[in-house]
Image (cartoon, rainbow, N blue to C red):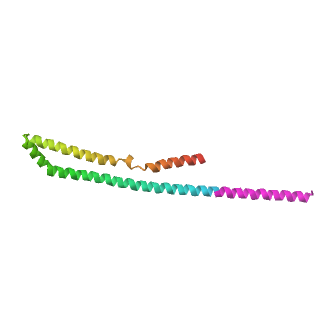
């Protein structure tokens, strides 16, 4: 082999190495682009889940508020309509009117308290938090940590 042949072979090897390096850079860029697209798709999916879960939780909150309002309405109607009838009925049984009124008032207060507590418990923040989204984000975070 001559000096010229040796230089030509060396130049071709250098060109081949630099071409391979460029391909690796493009492959790495392509992988990073794919990973970024997957992360964006994952975040979109999580956001969609978050939005759907919050919509469901808001509907539950409105239902709970409706129960509270219904409880108050029932309490008022019951106190106004049935209280006097029950007091009169208990008085007819021989109990003093004052004691009759006290018994009826306590009974309606218990009913109202149960309805109000049920509605209030349904409005607690822990029941409104997006639990599925939180679990998915934690799982996704662990997956990304393992991949990196």
Image quadrant holding the N terminus, namely bottom right
What stretch of residues is rendered in magenta?
A: 1-30
Q: Nearer the viewer, residue 24 or 107?
A: 107
Indicate the position of residue 117 as horizontal and vertical percent values. Answer: 28, 45
Residue 48 in the image: above or below residue 145 = below
The picture places residue 15, in percent across and down from the top left corner, at: 79, 59
Where residue 63 sits, quadrant-wise, is bottom left
Q: Residue at x 33, y 55 (%)?
A: 62
* Residue at screen point 49% across, 54% down: 46
Measured as percent of width and height from the top left, residue 114 is found at 26, 45
Residue 139 position in % (x across, y down): 52, 47
The structure residue drawn at horizontal position 29% and vertical position 46%, both measured from the top left corner, is 118
| In this rendering, position of residue 112 left or right of residue 27 | left
Asked whether, in this view, residue 98 is left or right of residue 1, the answer is left
Q: How many marks?
A: 0
Q: Main secondary structure of the magenta part?
A: helix
Q: Nearer the viewer, residue 147 or 90?
A: 90
Which residue occupies 65% across, 57% down? 29
The residue sitting at the front extreme is 93
As drawn, is 84 to the left or to the right of 4?
A: left
Tell me, yes or no, whether the highlighted magenta stretch contains residue 22.
Answer: yes
Quadrant in which residue 107 is drawn: top left
Report if residue 26 lies within the magenta region.
Answer: yes
The part of the image, by quadrant, that contains residue 99 is: top left
């Amino acid at each position: 082999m001559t000096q010229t042949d040796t230089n030509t072979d060396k130049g071709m090897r250098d060109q081949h190495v630099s071409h391979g390096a460029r391909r690796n850079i493009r492959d790495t860029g392509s992988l990073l682009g794919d990973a970024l697209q997957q992360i964006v798709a994952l975040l979109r999916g999580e956001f969609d889940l978050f939005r759907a879960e919050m919509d469901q939780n808001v509907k539950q909150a409105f239902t709970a508020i409706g129960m509270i309002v219904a409880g108050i309405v029932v309490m008022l109607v019951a106190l106004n309509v049935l209280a006097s009838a029950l007091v009169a009925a208990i008085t007819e049984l021989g109990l003093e009117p004052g004691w009759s009124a006290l018994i009826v008032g306590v009974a309606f207060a218990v009913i109202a308290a149960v309805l109000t507590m049920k509605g209030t418990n349904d409005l607690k923040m822990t029941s409104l938090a997006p639990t599925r989204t939180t679990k998915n984000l934690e799982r996704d975070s662990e997956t990304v940590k393992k991949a990196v």
